[in-house]
Image: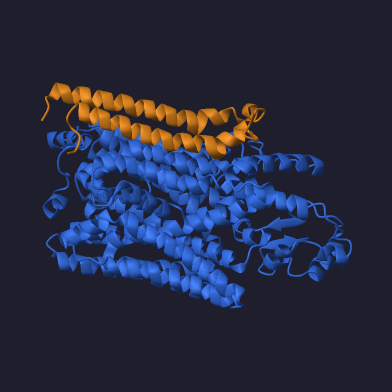
Chain colours: A blue, B orange
Amino acid sequence: MQQQRDAFIANLGRIYGTYTGGFIGFVIFLAILEWLGVPDRIIGYLFVFLTLAVYAGIGIISRTTQISEYYVAGRRVPAVYNGMATAADWMSAASFIGMAGSLYLLGYDGLAFVLGWTGGYVLVATLIAPYLRKFGAYTVPDFLAARYGGNFARLIGVVILFTCSLVYLMGQLKGTGVIASRLLDIPVNYGIFVGLVGILVCSMLGGMRAVTWTQVAQYIVLIIAYLIPVIILSAQKTGVPIPQIMYGQVLQQITELEQQFGIDKPHVQPWVNYDAVNFFALILCLMVGTASLPHVIMRFFTTPSVREARTSVGWALFFIFLLYFTAPAYAAFAKLEIFQNVIGKSVETLEAVQQLPAWVFLYGRIDLVKICGVSAADPQTVFDACRQAGVTTLTFDPTVFSINRDVVVISMPEVAGLPYVIAGLVAAGGLAAALSTADGLLLAMANALSHDIYYKMIDPTATTARRLVVARVLLFVVAALAAYLTITAPAHILKYVAWAFSLAAAGLFPALVLGVLWKNANTPGAIVGMLGGYGVTLFYIVMTNTGAMEPWFGIRNISAAIFGMPVAFVLTWVVSKATTPPPREIQEFVEQLRIPRGPVLMEEARRES
Amino acid sequence: MASPAQMEEYWRKTRNLLVTTLILWFVFGYVVHLFAPVLNGITFLGFPLGFYMAAQGSLIAFVLIIFWYAHRQNRIDQEFGVAED
């Protein structure tokens, strides 16, 4: 078994190389089918079911009956592959589909998301990953319990982990449902269940080990799907297939057209949609939130060494960077297309309306493009609505012309005049992004319940077999709960996802970081700090969102941790100072944590390895 | 295991590296972008420089900072004989 496994690790390059080649071959095969006249819908089905089958297949092959394999993939995932898995774990449906759209709408100010969601990895590499890897935790609350003496700190950790991850998971399930419903032509709620089956088959049998190898496969699909359409478009529009560099020229054209149209919020100008204070507050909250989200942190428990945990963070950010530095190019090409072919066009006659690009009506039919206040389902509708509204020429005013932010990425194949197979590829990439993040979140939550609550707090004498059964049952229960909540939740659930970052940043980050850097941080300090930081953040979000309170200093509640974080740090410090310092064992524990050499510290993990 | 004095020296070096890394992080995460309106007056590879830094420049810097940090920390670990085998 051991030998088999090592042979697998040794051959990873060949295995995933073959897989990548196979995937490209599969796309070419579908392109040939399309050329032969196979209907689009069949191609959509093939994309969904074949990619899902591959992910599930990896999950079944990676099934395990060992606890350390189930929770931390046996700690044998090489740095580069853990980096890829982390990138997939990290990049959600919102990154894949939504981010370029936000950049289209917000211009420079949207780059706060790009900066915040990348810079946080510097904090992960320097403050979090190496130390928690050395500790040998199975979950983030494991560390809190060991450092802050006991199950009360563990319980608070579980509660924070659960709230952050649950809203985030609901966002992913919704994304999965939307994409599956478009590709398969079924209602969104059925789409959610299609995705859920894929997620469960993959994670139930093999836990972290299965999720790891599936996420690597999903990263490969999502990055190919993201890059190909915009590379082709860049070659068409500029003659050079490197969109990330060529969109500099596109930005210049955009700026000229903006002046021509008299648009008062230029794309490249800072702080026209957010003020500077909110821009920087958002960057800080997203960065610290990144370094505190348990489903990301736990990926670094799987590397073979502390040293590899550090480099693995670098690889993770490199693989994330490949998508994030392309997203602004998508936004720029989309804006240019709209400036050149939509804005300034006449809608005075039906013939003129018919001249608008085909993608406008294609996405107008599914309510994603609105002109003169109505969904642009067909030229006649648009013509009537604009005549009634007294609009003769299309302008950039959102009441005259607006697109849903998802359109920027998903319409790119049509804008570039590419065949349906590329649109299917993009959808498969979005599905991979949503599924891989959902996998990680679901596992983080189920592990917190099975390991932290059941094994550590309810039945510490449970046998290995029993623990694995409980882990799998809880995985299923959490999945069902999340699906139920997603289906019944209000439509704007995606908005809540951004709050998860602030809650994690204020609730977990100070306790984790001070636990390593400050030996005198003690149990009462950490507990009061976590509760205080989390409480203030939650209070601010709830109060400003319901309108019961005016925002403080005009800070939007997406950056609520700007208040919660300092509160948590100060409370931890003051209370730790005012009470007795931690016992000698804890101080020695921190010293051991700081040096890479030696076995992992968590006793249970040491026994099992 | 090394002596307590050596361990103290090890942690001092580790902490200095940590502080340097976080300063670099702060410069590329925040300070550079405070000057975005000014930098936008300069053109770089066809981009307004302020926009370029937020869209690509800082991201490249973050990736390099992490690999540089990992390399340096590893050297410190080896110097004090606390690296893994």
A586 relative to A68, above or below:
above
Who is closer to the viewer here, A160 or A340? A340
Which residue is rendered at x = 33% and y = 54% of the image? Answer: A13
x, y percent for residue A282: 52, 41
User: Which of the two residues, A135 or A357, is positioned nearer the viewer here?
Assistant: A357
Visible residue check, residue A174: no
Q: Is residue B61 left or right of residue A466?
A: right
Determine the residue located farthest toward the right in the rendered image: A349
A25 in relation to A124, above or below: below
Residue nearer the viewer, A7 or B2: A7
Q: Please report the residue visible at 76 percent of the width from the left and 51 percent of the height from the top.
A: A340
Instruction: Left or right? Give the position of A205 relative to A180.
Output: left
Above or below B81: residue A111 = below
A379 on left or right of A154: right
Q: Quadrant of the N terminus of chain A?
A: bottom left
Which residue is found at the position 15% from the left and 39% from the top?
A598
> Where, by quadrant of the figure, is residue A307 drawn?
top left
Answer yes or no: is residue A112 visible: yes
Residue A543 location in percent, x, y? 51, 49
Could you say where residue A419 lies in the image, as x and y percent from the top left? 62, 66
| Tag count | 0
Q: Residue at x 40, y 54 (%)?
A: A89
Please give left or right for residue A398 compared with residue B56 in the image: right
Between A131 and A249, the one lying in front of the other is A249
Q: Is residue A160 above or below residue A417?
A: above
Q: Position of residue A302 (x, y in %)?
A: 27, 51
